[in-house]
Image (cartoon, grey):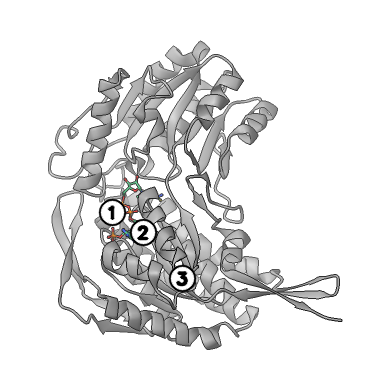
Amino acid sequence: MLNRIQHFINGEWVDSTDTEIINVINPANKKVIGKISDGTTEDLNRAVKAAKNAFLSFSKTTKKERITLLNQIADEFEKRKKEIVDTITLELGSPISNSYIPQFSMALAHYRQAAKELEDFEFVEYKNKAIVYKEPIGVSGLITPWNFPANQASTKIASAIASGSTVVLKPAQLTPFTAMIIADVFKAAGAPKGVFNLVNGSGKEIGNGISSHPDIDFVSFTGSGAVGQKITENAAKTVKKVSLELGGKSPLIVLKDCNIEKAVDITLSKSLFNSGQVCTAAAKIIIPEAIHDDFVKVLKKRISKFKIGDPQNQDTLIGPLVSEKQFNQVQKYIDTGIKEGANLIIGGKGHPEGFEGGFYARPTVFTNVNSNMSIAQEEIFGPVIPILSYEDIPEAIKIANDTIYGLAGYVIGNDKELAQETAISIRAGRVTINDAPEDYSAPFGGYKQSGVGREWGKYGIEEYLELKAILTE
Ligand code: TAP
């Protein structure tokens, strides 16, 4: 039982100002795995005060000092690999192999990448006779979701530290323990007191407190669109800069000349990874009419290879959803898909046989989906694959862009030129062709209602900077 009922403020683990606690559940068996404090506004105020004090000196550190600190953080993070991987597996229900790659490895990569970006990052630019200084933005409030507990926090923290800003993190109450290990990492790495602070608690109390706090200069949020809007409204009252990484309904366009087996494998991994609880998940699959039936035939065979199981088992590829709320949301969309007339060819409502004790949903595939259906428009955040078909490329692109979102997209095909042209036509912040690997130096973020601002690499660091022009004679 993990009993971590303290907050990390000013370089120390400290008691909460209240005794309220929150139970954390293992989604694979619904058992309580530990407790955290349900933080108060007073706890948040202490953390903000520490971050504000620390900013006075941390904002003056040199690039070299911050490169050293980021590498020390990365080293300490790496030392705790097993603890982090086990914790993600326990609190999120992510299969253990995925808790390592990419959950752990992505988070680690952000610290290393930020240190690397700093090497040749220019904090001073000369424009005619003006000198442009890029200064750290100040106290940054970070609010993170549960679906990538290490990665979502680490990309924000790494960028903030690289810029010389200080932070107050509020992780999701469903998955708080991984973030608490990050606090241990900061302590072990010898980070100056107050540079990193963590307050646990609810979005209602601590999240709202962050977005409306007069001493917080910037809020970086990842999560749902509804909460993103609320944060923006709150932040407007103190004219705070806000960066939002929200949801998506990312299209995956398969081109006619693809290798069908390969295309199916990529589709399944992009749709079903993390049980579909990924903001960049391939969430509407757009197939040429000419190969539709062959593609579906292969997909029916291949999907059984995605073994559902206990997240602790090395060969498990699909674990439970994170919570009952998430399970119910997925059930609702499966119901809606059926009611709206899509053709359910795999899966359906309920639990997979033998997995009734956790929040497991059945991997589900719908064909005969049209672009107006809710399952083609709304973010399901579960293992549900809607398949649509197209006659020609303009129609494929029209379907792909028929969404309020624009976070990611995918194109699979052999004709490199056509794949690239198609990728360019998708209105989204990050489009992957075939099975291209991640690139941590490239920007990550959304068009349209998928968000505001960018994370990762130098683009992430730039979010945490203010520009000052000094005009000289
Ligand atoms: P959210 O409610 O958006 O939670 C994300 C974070 O925001 C959590 O830390 C949450 O705190 C906090 N929060 C909640 N209300 C807040 C408020 N008023 N002010 C500031 N922070 C607040 O997400 P969810 O309810 O867990 O999931 C709902 C849906 O959001 C999912 O089904 C999915 O569609 C989407 N989602 C998207 C993403 C990404 S990466 N785009 C990630 C997760 C979920 P708590 O600890 O109280 O939850």
What is the secondary structure assignment of the residue under circle 3? Answer: loop
Labels 3 and 1: the sequence-earlier one: 1
Question: Which marked residue is nearer to the observer: mark 3 or mark 1?
Answer: 3
Location of residue 100 (image quadrant): bottom left
**Viewer-side residue, 473 vs 1:** 473
Tell me the crowding category of disc 3: few under 14, some 14 to 19, or many 20 or more residues within 10 angstroms, Cα based: some
Beta carbon at label 1 within 8 Å of ligand 1: no
**Disc 1 residue crowd, few under 14, some 14–19, many 20+, Cα 10 Å:** many
Q: Nearer the viewer, residue 33 or 86?
A: 33
Q: Which circle, 3 or 2, is nearer the viewer?
A: 3
Residue 92: image tag: 1
Instruction: Give the amino acid type for the residue marked by disc 3 in the picture.
Output: Thr
Q: Residue at x 61, y 65 (%)?
A: 462
- Using the rendered image of the protein, determine whether residue 7 is visible from the camera's viewpoint: no
Residue 278: name its quadrant. Answer: top left
Vertical side of 305 occupied by 93: above or below: below
Residue on which disc 3 sits: 238
Callout count: 3
Q: Is residue 279 above or below residue 352?
A: below
The residue where tag 2 is placed is: 149
Residue neighbourhood size for the residue with mark 2, other residues' Cα within 10 Å, grouped as few (<14), some (14–19), many (≥20): many
Q: Is residue 268 visible?
A: yes
Residue 340 or residue 312, whichever sits in front: 340
